[in-house]
Image (cartoon, helix red, strand yellow):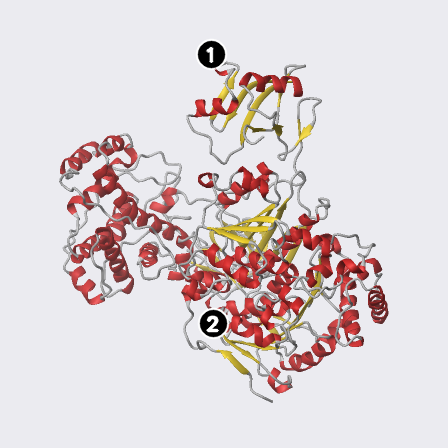
Amino acid sequence: MPDPMDVEVEGTANEPLDEALYSRQLYVMGKEAMAKMTTCDVLFVGVSGLGIEIAKNVVLAGVRSVTLYDPEPARIEDLGSRFFLGPGDVGKPRSESCAKNLAELNNYVKVSVHEGELSPEFVGKHTVVCVTGQKLSVTRELNSVCHPKGIPMVVADCLGIMASIFCDFGEGFTVVDTTGEEPLNVLCSSITKDAAGGLVTTHDENRHGFEDGDYVTFSEVQGMTELNGLAPVPIKVTGPYSFQICDTSTFGDYLGGGYAHQVKQPKTISHKALDQALMDPSFLMSDFAKFDRPMQLHVLVQALSLFRDENSGKLPTPGNRAHIARAVALCREQNAKLKEPVELDEALLSTLASASAGEIAPMTAFIGGIAAQEVLKAASSKFMPIDQFFYFDATEALPYKLDALPPEGEVAPAGTRYDGMVAVFGKTLVAKLMRERYLLVGAGAIGCEMLKNWALMGLGAGEGGMVLVTDPDNIEKSNLNRQFLFRPWDVTKPKSVCAAAKVREMNPEVRIDAHTNKVGDDTEHIYNDDLMESLTGICNALDNVHARLYMDSRAVYYKKPLLESGTLGTKGNVQVVVPNLTESYASSRDPPEKSIPVCTLKNFPNQIEHTIQWARDVFEGLFKQGAEDANAYLSQADFLEKLEQQPGVRRPTLQQLHSNLVADRPRTLEDCVAWARMRFEEHYNNTIQQLLFNFPVDMVTSSGTPFWSGPKRAPTPLAFDPEDPLHLDFVVSAANLRAAMYGLKGSVDPRFFKKAAANVMVPKFQPKRGVKIKADENDNTTEGIDDDDAECERLIKDLPTSSQLAGFRLTPVEFEKDDDTNFHVAFINAASNLRARNYKIAEADALRTKQIAGKIIPAIATTTALVTGLVCIELMKLVCGNKTIEDYKNGFANLALPFFAFSEPMAAPKIKMGKSGAEWTLWDRFEVNEGRDLTLKEFIQYFAEKHRLEVTMISSGVSIVYSFFTAKSKLAERMPMPMSQLVTSVSKTELPPGSNYLTFELCCNDVDDDEEVDVPAVKYRYRKY
């Protein structure tokens, strides 16, 4: 047997993880799982479109090696699903053609091609085996090798508009973390002594979130100290704020405090071998509305394999009635062999068999994301595997009904790259798809996957078709782990431009244009009425709610379908917004993020999230806001006058100005070190001493309870120690950031910083009387000291004038989380962990700090692939154009559990216009186009005559252009004015040159009964009639 042919080899498993590359994935998988993955060798048998999709996701994730086996020559139709193949690869072995491009995705993964037969010895060398596009006989043979050796095996197939996954992880596979969720920690308020199990009541700020059978440990419990350090104990939930633990009758009396910490428990699972599982299958449901489908699809997949055995490995020719009939007959035979035969829907099976030869990008992306995560579960022992079969179909996307097969000529192959799409959707619909004009907003992770799918599908590849992608961001190293269109040499280049270039490589027929604009009010002159009206749809690939809401409003205004999706680690969701049919994205909103109370941040933190947010705020104040205030003082003559009107911030702003421009203005790096050393003393010693002076450790409240109890943790001042790495990290990072503000050269030499810090004279701190500190959020105390005005005047007197510092400016430091050399995260990590030491809170590593401070969304390529596949299925339904609301599917998935849920979109709510008027929804407008620009008088008459409405008020944006209470003289002046002139006159702004419409909001009364009526907005055409 020949050795594998190495295509590209980079990196070794012994190298430390590249956190800059894998940062977003590390937040999902964790370091232990990632480290285990880097020792994993994956064998791919079959490089179908699905196979290369799975391999792409696995290589991006960072296993040790990937070996490809598929000696079959590439065919022209393969270009419709294999994104690493080009026309020049037709006729060459599939695996060889794909390997080089696959290797470029991750330099740490060895990619090779195996030539020759698959011997049991060769297969047995691998950690995981993934099989795609193979006959059942081949899969059985491989499983007979893998199952006895405990080698996890993932089998996946895409057969037209249906797909399947089978997992066999052996008979004793241990999952170390079944959900991937962060372990919960709750504050205890009471624990009873009870032989039947002590009852733990938690603090009533938050529900505990535990479930029956969870395990917990305890720490910091006072009185009942036997719980501290006790081995994990199982719990029984008795309520949202209570749970029962072990026998506590012999423990000491509970006095107060304590935390319960959830402890994840490993779970061992056993899978049946393939032959046994085929006869006695267990299913993971993909769609609960299709409860009868899994068993029928189970029968069909086996029947199609038998059909391939009879027909030289080929699936039924699309539309061929004889082939379809034979496939259905084989279904009957297979069904009869089951212990409990099922009722077969032969119309369904005929439709699925007819399209089974077509491998299409929407299905390979969806199934490829799921199957790749199963491979990674086997490689990492993290997250729960599928048990054991998963079937999925999307027959709602087909342009014909299940009981009416399309004409053979409509779906027959024509020897083009689109044959797979034609086999499923027919030539007519594919031609329509190629003429579609879509705006894609965002070229990040979702955007890259979407563009890949569209290139393979042929979206925008026909006459009049177009893809317009816009993204203002440039490529960063951390993007390469999941934004697979980009390579290391693309870093710093525009995302949209590079992505568009890759699309042209995949499919030169696609007409794609790349913009680097941010969508919003500022770019409406670019994305104007003419452009937006020319689109057939909008697809969001965004990572923030604000931009999503904006694009949603544009979609509703222009009545364009909107495809919306998002991911969060292993979770993904898809929403389809259909004009005149469904609600919009803005119709339902997630609850706002819970904010941390200010007094908790300032004085009473009890979680690492509190100290990280505090450190982030300190960073902004010291290195950004302070510099901006100094520059504003030096450039704005009325700065001090404006500041006087802000009593709450006046004194601290003047203190920082004085420090930055007078007292602590540095001339050398040594000066910056001295400043940093003093900041250490201020934050971690002096402030803590003052807090304990105001609220002594033994203080009790008016109710007799200790002040420092419940969520309040009594702090301890820190004494600076230059030999403590964390102390030194703070000084090094703070001094370098200070130097950057003043244009001074920095350093990383620890000896320099230790020596400079040791030379700083630190005055002894004496707590002050009269300093006011809020005890909690309900405390109305005004914080500070009583002599604010006098101190402010003294500080102002000492400040230099702008003329004395002519030309001098500071450089504000903008927080950048992904540059590990700029000291930004280093400062926040040190500042946060020092504060955590003050309050005896468990410290965080730099990776965790970066995530919280940078508000990084955990992300992995598998979830991204999954959601874009689902989006493209909904896209095909939109292209069909004749679908009901029941045909569309909003989707949610959690790959960790795994769990999938689909539901029809919510219908757009209807609003009644008056007591007996027509109903309208968010999609409705009064469309006013009279072929000219109406005067205000004519506009009011139009609604009175045509809609029996008395207009009492008209607004455009924030400007009221007409109201019944407007002065008569002003009304007389406005009535003869054209509406466009009226708007410019009242708003004092010019109308954009690319705008053809004005939007008006009306207040109206019914002419007949004088009752106020809710009415939709007015879309008024004043140009290009």
In the orientation shown, which residue stands out farthest toward the top? 968
Residue type highlighted by circle 2: Ala
- How many numbered marks, from 0 up? 2
Label 1 sits on residue: 967
Whether the residues at callouts 2 and 1 have beta carbons within 8 Å, the answer is: no
Residue at 32% x, 52% y is: 715
Q: Position of residue 1016 (x, y in %)?
A: 61, 28
Under circle 2, the secondary element is helix
Residue at 14% x, 35% y is: 797
Q: Quadrant of the N terminus?
A: bottom right
Q: Position of residue 408 (x, y in %)?
A: 80, 60
In this orientation, does residue 212 appear? no
In this orientation, does residue 961 appear? yes
Question: Alpha-carbon distance for marks 2 and 1?
Answer: 75 Å
Q: Is residue 646 above or below residue 846?
A: above
Q: Position of residue 609 (x, y in %)?
A: 41, 52
**Does residue 152 appear left or right of residue 988 in this picture?**
right
**Does residue 407 appear left or right of residue 108 in this picture?**
right
**Does residue 492 appear left or right of residue 470 in this picture?**
left
In the orientation shown, which residue stands out farthest toward the bottom? 1
Which of marks 1 and 2 precedes in the sequence?
Answer: 2
Judging depth in this view, the residue of 992 and 539 nearest the camera is 992
Label 2 sits on residue: 35
Residue type highlighted by circle 1: Ala
Label 1: how many residues lie within 10 Å, few (<14), some (14-19) or many (20+)? Answer: few
Q: Quadrant of the C terminus?
A: top right
Judging depth in this view, the residue of 241 and 892 nearest the camera is 892
Q: Which mark is residue 109?
A: none
Judging depth in this view, the residue of 548 and 806 nearest the camera is 806
Q: Is residue 967 above or below residue 96?
A: above
Residue 81: name its quadrant.
bottom right
